[in-house]
Amino acid sequence: MHTEVSNAGVSAGSTLTFSTLGLAQPILRAIADAGYTTPTPIQAKAIPLVLGGGDLLAGAQTGTGKTAGFTLPLLHLLHAKHQHAQAGKPRCLILTPTRELAAQVEESVKTYGKYLHLTSMVMFGGVNINPQTARLRKPLDILVATPGRLLDHVTQKHIDLSGVAFLVLDEADRMLDMGFVRDIKRILALLPKHRQNLLFSATFSDEIKALADSLLHNPGFVEVARRNTASELVEQTVHLVKQAHKTSLMSYLIKANNWKQVLIFTRTKHGANRLADKLGKDGIPAAAIHGNKSQGARTKALADFKAGNIPVLVATDIAARGLDIDQLPQVVNFELPNMPEDYVHRIGRTGRAGASGAAVSLVDSEELKYLKDIEKLIKREIPKVVAEGFVPPAKQEADAPRPPKPQQQQRRPQGNGQGQKTGQAQKQTQPKHKQSDKPVSEAPRHQAKPQHKSNKPVSEAARHQASAQPALFSPKPTHHSGNRGR
Ligand code: AMP
């Protein structure tokens, strides 16, 4: 049986209270401490279903309150079933695609479970495995993990998954995008047959449906409005600008508007580094966060940004995925993503949980086709605004090259065929934007990622994930110095 709820808004809006949902007193106290008064729509619908013991298929993105939507009822159920936690044998497993999301989810577990006697840990790759191994020797109820590192521990026999009574796949679509499907299947094979399964996903592709079919038994179904329909809280504008002038405009906007906390998205890791450096040289402290940075550097950059010690964080999509930074007022797309859904995810970093925010996109002539796709997805035109007072530098920014162009076949097919009209639409929407605005520098195009062989659309996250690989597989230099004979 399906219990279906759709088009519920992102912010808390129902008249229901947490206590009427039947959550245990210590959990209600923690919720009150967190300052929540009303369940968000996803919470109002998901919590009773999970408390009822059934499987759940939920369509919700970060920012809807989905984490509490599964964490609160699971804490209740684990608390209600008195059981002594065993070392290295968790009762609840929460899988997430990224390290940051795993850390955030475990933080939520701790926040909402602070008056309970339940234990939790988070594990992800990119950090020393030994402290995790040591932690696994102590009693453990709730494990939040990314799939790869979990399998490392499984292989090394540090962990026993035969006691998992509750499984959550959070952001399942991203996990599949990032190529975790085999890892997930390996993990599922290690779990006991009888357990409660919750699957959260922002999209429902055929792959997600297949995964849900194989995993869930008569699931309840809950869906809240996609962020693109809920993005009214985010004021969105576009500045049309040459690629070569973007860095100068970025500095100008930050200074002119006195932005104190701005998250900037670039398409590439290299671009993120370069922009953070340039802003630093302009006297604007900035840190970059992406997959090539060590976990320590990522954690520090995020903590500094959250604490307000640095005003600017430059991030790639994958690094920023799932980041929950309270009251983030300003997001900038330094380049537009080629997947319109990624735009929606990006601007979702602001205007969260009822707060208002602003998203500015710097768009050059070659990105107008992406803008068109985005406007189609969010079903509205984004105002094109002139950055008043900005005088483009007379000299082109020599080191402001265009990021690698995404491969055409990686773009999501538009279904109704309208996607092919982008060139034409571009002229209609932006007649003043001349082709001669194209930046001259073609140099960095050689950095473009190798072409994907399949015609399958690949998201920003998947490409970033893929781009972490070349360091491992890049061909060895052919000009060895003499003492390395073949
Ligand atoms: P999530 O979608 O789980 O990433 O949550 C997004 C943000 O909403 C987090 O900062 C939560 O602390 C916040 N939040 C979750 N539930 C509520 C609620 N019922 N009322 C207000 N804020 C909430």
Image (spheres, rainbow, N blue to C red):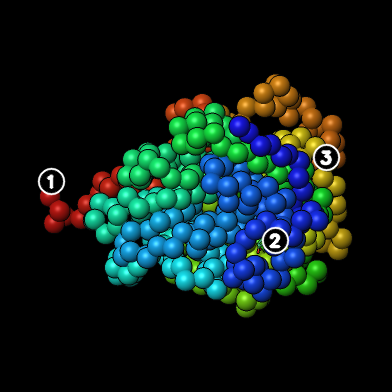
The residue lying furthest to the bottom in this view is 309
Which amino acid, by three-letter code, is at mark 3?
A: Arg
- Residue ID at (65%, 58%): 22
Q: Earlier in the sequence, mark 2 or mark 3?
A: 2
Q: Is mark 2 within 8 Å of ligand 1?
A: yes
Residue behind mark 2: 18
The residue lying furthest to the top in this view is 417
Residue 135 position within the rendered picture, expressed as x and y whole percent measured from the top left: 34, 69
Q: Please tell me the numbered disc located at residue 380.
A: 3
Determine the image quadrant of residue 432.
Answer: top right
Residue 144 position within the rendered picture, expressed as x and y whole percent measured from the top left: 45, 58
Alpha carbons under labels 1 and 3: distance apart: 61 Å
Residue behind mark 1: 486
Which amino acid, by three-letter code, is at mark 1?
A: Arg
Q: Is mark 1 within 8 Å of ligand 1?
A: no
Ligand 1 placement by image quarter: bottom right
Alpha carbons under labels 2 and 3: distance apart: 35 Å
> Camera-side residue: 46 or 337?
46
Q: Is residue 357 visible?
A: no
Q: Are marks 1 and 2 in contact (CB under 8 Å)?
A: no
- Residue ID at (47%, 53%): 94
Q: Is residue 462 left or right of residue 5?
A: left
- Residue ID at (35%, 53%): 163
Q: Secondary structure at mark 3?
A: loop
Q: Earlier in the sequence, mark 1 or mark 2?
A: 2
Alpha carbons under labels 1 and 2: distance apart: 70 Å
